Amino acid sequence: MLFVNTSLTPASASYLLVTRRRFCVQITAIFLAAVYWVSMCPPAAAEPLPDTRSVGGNSCQLTSRSPSFPETTHTHLVWSLDLIQLREVSDVSLSPDGRLVVFQLHRALVGSNSLCTRWYAIRIDGRSRPKDLTGAGNPPWDEIGQWQSSKPTWSKDNDSFLHLKYENGHYQLWRTFVAAPRSVPIFRRNRDVRSFCWGPDQHSAVVEVGPVDTERTTAFRKLVREGVVYDYSFNESIAPLETEQDLGPQLPSASTYFVVDSNGRPIRNANKEDVDYLKNHLSTPYQQQKASPDGTVIASIEDIPGPSGDRFNSFAIFVRKNGSDPRQVTSTFRTITQLWWTSSSKEVVFVAGNNGESGIFKVDIEEPKTQVIRGPKGEETFYQCTADSKTTHLACTLETPDSPAEAAVISMHGGRLQVLTDANPEYNRLIRSAAKKYEWTNRYGDSAFGYLFLPVNYVKGTRYPLIITTYRAWGFMRGGVGDEYPVQVLAANGFAVFVWERTRNYEPATGHSQEFESTLKDWQSPVASLQQITESLDNAGIIDNSKIGITGLSWGAGLALYAISHVHLFSAASVSNPGVTDPMFYYIGGTVWREQFARWGLPGLPTGPSADKWRKWSTALNSDQITAPLLIQASNMEYFASLQLVTTLKMMNKPVELIIYPGESHIKKEPVHKLELYTRNVDWFRFWFQDHEDPDPAKAEQYVRWRELRRLQEKNKAGAKPN
């Protein structure tokens, strides 16, 4: 990682520390092993404990207890490693006969800086233990660091399922058998599988694949040799132009279609009928529309634009029959994620939710009348659900604010919930803070909600520093979007933590633009919500309003940066990437972003007719208003876009530190980096709000830098003019 200190004295302003990853991992592993043995001793009292770096639990095995936490181990407060090495359940899929569920389990392993992945199967009656089927391959990250679905797709005879497997740099198609576990490759060549489905005879699969490696590599080498024509097709802010992925738009990308035997033997090139069949039967966990079993009606999830043309605020189910206009058959929900038809072709089952909770519903398309099958209740959130062939049960990933993901089954008759797994029994024994939900309406008339986690050793009447994470407040609240701000670890170290979610989006509908004032509301309204909830917590005597910190990634980072430069509410901030509100982003964001700025009411150059609007919006152009020390922990693909802000703050002698993580993208994924992010964020807020410095000798230089930032902060306060 790269540590860039932008606020040191002139003699040391060029300070740059580069730690080679291999050396870092070796030293970390030695230290982890040493601390593991120390961690076996019972912890003292209820003091917040330092982060352990145990190497234990290096497997994806589902057991009643983790190898790293023997039964005799005392419970303790949540440490960073407890969160990072949680077993994560995903890709839950129910067999057509409704008897078996398969799911994928993956787990980050800090000691080896790797992830393990495995497939399991379990009966829905819960009378058997999960059956270990096979390894699931390498982590399937997408280009921005998100975990991708392996799209498990059952055969009609319930004996096996097709799924993607990322291995040797490619997405391959495999078939895994359940009764006698084994896996066989269906399509494993030097090209990526993009989509697939079982053929109509269930003895073959239709597969869409990308170009072969040699074709792309030849084109890439030609660009490297001749130079790259800058055609605005790539995002300059995140494209170092060093790999084939960076130059994707300029490389061959056409798909080819094949029909292959379900045992992996090639049959032939696909014809038009095969391709059409694939497009109508794609294996995807989030299908936005489906035809009824009798083929006469199409049901779809549709966005309902608001009065001012804004989108992503409410959704409903629509149906259309025989080419007729779509007809809305449900009320609106904040989210609708999935839908299925019942066997009668008269009812649609769907997963929908509002304000952090989701439930399962059914609508009769002729009435139409919506029936609640389950919830919303207890802040349950259901993800990636699948149905059996008759839609009598759904199998889903289930999360709550306090509980990581589990595999669960819900009956469509009465809504009975059966949780099938206990993926993290050790975590349930740890000392944690419980979530309390808040809902309110701000001065713009927009609703908001979030969850408060009090310090673990909370004493009524004592005021605590507050840390805010900026979206999402759905499901398990681990570390905010991107998972860099460990909620329970902060609570264990004496912080109140508020996990906040916005419920209004001022984004214009596709193909439309909006006045700049509406764009500003997309930032002003959320800030107003944060002002209101912090005032409420202050009036309740819970928080110290002079010690409020804000964090964020992606849109949340942009909001945090806008907030610290436009209101004087926050006393420290940490963000995971640059925002998009600075003029520099206009020049490096590519055509897509320049078109987006125009839709936001910012046409033309930032120095042209829109200059006054940029002045109102930009963080960098309002740097003189920033009083909060700022930590930016960005990937090497995104840090460049933060340099206008960082350089401006540096020239103003304001406390800012930029840390760059090589090999990462929008969302950072390497376990060793995740541990560094967790630890440094906790250290940052403890330093500014608790005057605490970790005595770990490995962090000595970190605190040398931060003490210099504190001296700048104190100097700025002493010379500050009333605002």
Image (spheres, helix red, strand yellow):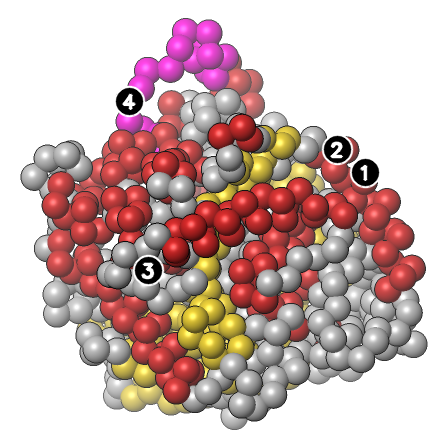
> On the image, numbered disc 3 is attached to which residue?
563
Other-residue count near label 1 (Cα within 10 Å), few / some / many at <14 / 14–19 / ≥20:
few
Q: N-terminal of the two: label 3 or label 1? A: 1
Dot label at residue 231: 4
> On the image, numbered disc 2 is attached to which residue?
22
Dot 2 and dot 1 residues touching (CB under 8 Å): yes
Which circle, 3 or 1, is nearer the viewer? 3
Cα separation, mark 4 vs mark 3, equals: 35 Å
Cα separation, mark 2 vs mark 4, equals: 37 Å
- Residue 23 coordinates in the image, percent (x, y): 77, 33
Cα separation, mark 2 vs mark 1, equals: 6 Å
Q: Three-letter amino acid code at disc 2? A: Arg
Which circle, 3 or 2, is nearer the viewer? 3
Dot 1 and dot 4 residues touching (CB under 8 Å): no
Q: N-terminal of the two: label 2 or label 4? A: 2
* Element on which disc 1 rests: helix
Q: Three-letter amino acid code at disc 3? A: Ala
Cα separation, mark 1 vs mark 4, equals: 43 Å
> On the image, numbered disc 1 is attached to which residue?
26
Look at 31% across and 32% down and name the residue there: 588
Classify 356 as above or below 270.
below
The magenta stretch is 219-235
